[in-house]
Amino acid sequence: MDKMPKWADVVLTPLISLFLAFAISGLVILAIGESPWEALKTMVTGALGSSYGWGFTLYYATNFIFTGLAVAVAYHAAMFNIGGEGQAGLGGLGVAMVCLFIPWPHWSLALIAAMIGSALFGAAWAYIPAILQAKRGSHIVITTIMFNFIAAALLNWALVNWLRPIGSMDPASANFPASTHLPKITDMFAGFGIEWGKHTPANITFFVALLACLAVWLLIWRTRLGYEIRAFGKSESAARYAGISPTRITVIAMLISGGLAGMMAINNVMGEGERLILNNVEGAGFIGIAVALMGRNHPIGVLLAALLFGFLYQGGGELALWTSIPRELIIVIQALVILFTGALDNMVRMPLEAFFLSRRRRGTAERS
Amino acid sequence: MTLLKSVLASATAVGLLVGAAHAEPALIFDLGGKFDKSFNEAAYHGAEKWKEETGGSYKELEMQSEAQREQALRRLAETGANPIVMTGFAFGEVLNKVAPDYPETKFVIIDMVVEQPNVQSNVFNEGEGSYLAGIMAAQASTSGTVGFIGGMDIPLIHKFECGYRQGFLAAKPDGKVIINYTGTTPAAWNDPVKGGELAKAQKAQGADVIYAAAGGTGIGVLQAAADEGVLSIGVDSNQNHLHPGKVLTSVVKRVDSAVYDAFTAGDAVEPGIKVWDVKSDGVIVAMDENNAPLVTPEMTAAVDEAKAKIASGEIVVHDYMTDNTCPAD
């Protein structure tokens, strides 16, 4: 029997955690002599107060949806993929190769090719840890995190020695040709006659991310493969008894996970940067872990958590740019949110459960 | 007395008016942050020097993520800041896009060339400064082997390495340079422990002068070199004082001067490329009381000679960036 109603589990717990995180952040801001109210106002208006702010919030959220889904899919197979950072980085390499070496007549074709390219590269990067886990039992947490460093080294090598135009100081690829530039949200809304703040990085990839959410939901809950992944994740021995091959599921789940992480590159490399730079993932791979945990590994949860972190990123950026609150403090606020919604989840959940349990007991006692 | 007062008052009023007419300059620090003990911090010192001397104020921003660059530039330009100074090559692409939209605003970029009519590009010839350091290392080394420790393995640092090797080999053709890079992620700029380990490893291979072009990692290199009794060479800002008598010299990029000059010029900043090299004293090898006991008269003579030859064009220090190769290979 459930200890508390579903809505309390899914909505109330994260909201209270969030509130606690913001309350403590407020105290920290107060302690350094700034006004928490002003800070909150800057964050909210900067991230959500204008279509301009939304343009950034959605851009960051798109990154986090992909990496969050990546972690969630692996998690359903009881694997902790913390290699999203490296997989997304390699995905960027895939996107760069698609955009730089093939002349595309139209962005739509380039987008489809880039989706395939980034997913292939991301999946390939996840394949090696997956096969090591499945065949050799090398723990996926260790191997994926090590692969992040190898990916960084590989990317660095590719950019410095291969993709960088001669004479350029910047370890970055050449600019992608104009025919691969994705439509920005500004352009798309202008097509419908709606004005959207100019020069924001949000682009069509956001809608690809929404499709990815739907696809993951269909995969996990509506297909045979998804059932096998979940069964394997719940109990490996039971899954084995039912004839599910652990090697196959481990590898497939990690390939999907890596592919999703890799697809983040369409947003940041193709959509925003329009060239491949060294520091393109910027920690989104790790934020994906927090997003998946907070979103309870459900695509809708991931979407909402990604929006929250998009808000934190953009709002935090505004705070650092336009107030005297040091940027290190923004990281403290983000960390508090992760701490409360992820690590200290039970701190809120247990009293809530006790509260609902006592209410239910009282309810049954009155009835009897 | 009253006359004097009113004259003073009106002078102040005029001063204020002039001040109001001048837009506030702005300085944007790159992802490394304001206090990176190196590049961004040098820019900060330049701005602070200007502030102290003129009593003016300036806006400053620290980047948080790549996507913010364009946002920061546009918003600063829209608030009327002029000139807008930014540190680091990573701004190059974005500035190229943004500058044409604000023709009235002057932009100043450091370490990168952006060809726009309202942009001043400040580039430093780190290779030449490193060449001088190489000459000093050749004089100071008794083993004939010296070391180079780079931060992140990127072209910019190869430029330092290449100049250093050319200078050293010009003075000691049969000498040997051991080269190590700290890493391939941005973390390589701030890993003093690994820097120290690399310095010890280089010492074990016979190096007795070690040049660190590695940002915060260099602090560990200088420390380990001082502990192990070998000499080190600092970078970007003058680091001679960190271990007096143990740091042979520092290759200093006058980023502070670049920022100071830009702020002083205000909105009259001259667009175009501004090269800071040995000839213009834009890159120097630091000589002060901390390294005076280490610098022999022959060393000074050799450095002065090389400086004069570089200035006259007799010595051409090959720039790694032009073709991604180094003649010292």
Image (tube, coloured by chain):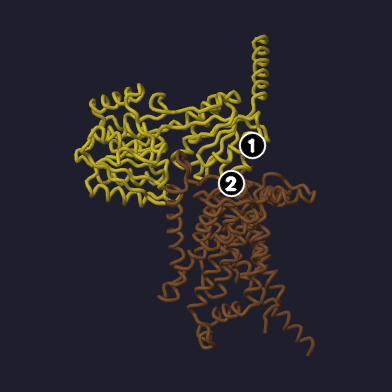
Chain colours: A brown, B yellow
Q: Which mark is residue B76?
A: 1
Image coordinates for residue A90, horizontal then vertical, percent: 50, 58
**Residue type highlighted by circle 2:** Pro
**Residue type highlighted by circle 1:** Leu
Q: Which residue is mark 2?
A: A177
Please give the chain letter of the residue carrying mark 1: B
- Pointer 2 and pointer 1 on the same chain: no
Q: Front-most of A298 and B314?
A: B314
Q: Front-most of A56 and A113?
A: A113
| Residue visible at 65% across and 20% down in the picture | B18
Image coordinates for residue A332, horizontal then vertical, percent: 56, 54
Q: Front-most of B20 and B149?
A: B149
**Rendered-image quadrant of the C terminus of chain B:** top left
Image coordinates for residue A286, horizontal then vertical, percent: 53, 60
Hey, which quadrant is residue B249 in on the image? top left
Q: Secondary structure at mark 2?
A: loop
Mark nearest the camera among 2 and 1 is: 2
Residue A281 at least partly seen:
no
Is disc 2 in contact with disc 1, using a CB cutoff of under 8 Å? no
Image coordinates for residue A204, horizontal then vertical, percent: 67, 55
Above or below: residue A177 compared with residue A60? above
Residue A127 at least partly seen:
yes
**Cα separation between marks 2 and 1:** 29 Å
Density class for disc 1 (Cα within 10 Å; few <14, some 14-19, many ≥20) is many
